[in-house]
Image (cartoon, rainbow, N blue to C red):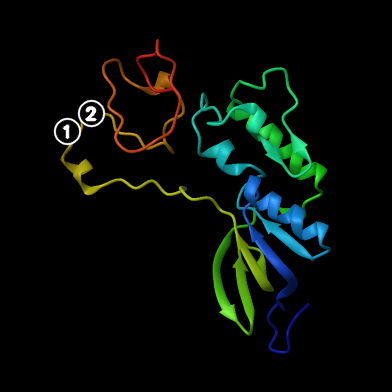
Amino acid sequence: MRSPDGRRAAERVTTVVIGAGHAGLAASHFLGERSIDHVVLERGEVANSWRRERWESLRLLTPNWQSRLPGLRYEGPDPDGYMTMGEVIEFIERFAIASRAPVRTSTTVTSVRRADGGYDVTTDRGEIRCRALVIASGACNQPAVPPVTDAVPESVEQLTPFGYRGPDQLPDGGVLVVGASARRRPASSSRPR
């Protein structure tokens, strides 16, 4: 559909949810439960941050018995264990399917502007006008590397969590982790997992 000036007319929906991780999908569940028309926009795939921005051996930081989404809970054999990255992805995917979330994958939001009592959301696939907006894109998806890193000798390997995938990519020797992280590491390990 085109506007009178020849441009593609903006799609209209009551609510746009940005992010198809657990928070965005839970928001979608509650919007759907109230019959509020909406769309969930995801730059990658469902659970994209877990798929692309986590190291392979990362485990959920809370025990499995605490893992819940609306109408879905952990029902596996190890309630006191911690889900692996793959298990978390599967859990979130299962919820997306069960809740019938209206997810549009591979859709990147490039800008959001306030407009006429709502928002204009620009994506790489077109414009969407909405009355309400839920931003569920995560809190830490940009590594913050301080300028002091420039003073570290080139012989020292430096990685952010976005570049780290597993201990095999680290050179032999000691490891220094700088920054805050609530990750679990087995006591017998000499490298971060």
Q: Name the residue located 73 percent from the left edge and 22 percent from the top edge.
A: 76
**Camera-side residue of 22 and 49:** 22
Q: Residue furthest bottom?
A: 4
Q: Name the residue located 50 percent from the left edge and 35 percent from the top edge.
A: 54
Percent from the top left, x then y, of residue 8? 70, 77
Q: Taking 61 as reference, is 12 above or below it?
A: below
Q: Is residue 186 left or right of residue 28?
A: left
Quadrant in the picture for the N terminus = bottom right
Q: Residues within 10 Å of mark 1 (few under 14, many from 20)?
A: few
Q: Residues within 10 Å of mark 2 (few under 14, many from 20)?
A: few
Quadrant in the picture for the C terminus = top left
Q: Name the residue located 70 percent from the left edge and 57 percent from the top edge.
A: 40
Q: Is residue 19 left or right of residue 99?
A: left
Q: Taking 157 as reference, is 148 above or below it?
A: below
Q: Amino acid at mark 1?
A: Pro
Separation of residues labelled 1 and 2 (CA atoms): 6 Å
SS under mark 2: loop
**Camera-side residue of 11 and 177:** 177
Percent from the top left, x then y, of residue 111? 54, 68
**Camera-side residue of 62 and 52:** 62
Is residue 105 in view from this perspective? Answer: no
Q: Amino acid at mark 2?
A: Val
Q: Name the residue located 58 percent from the left edge and 36 percent from the top edge.
A: 51
Quadrant assignment, res 73: top right
Residue 153 numbered tag = 1
Residue 40 numbered tag = none
Q: Is residue 165 left or right of residue 70?
A: left
Label 2 near label 1: C-beta < 8 Å? yes
Task: Quickly name the residue at label 2.
Answer: 156
SS under mark 1: loop
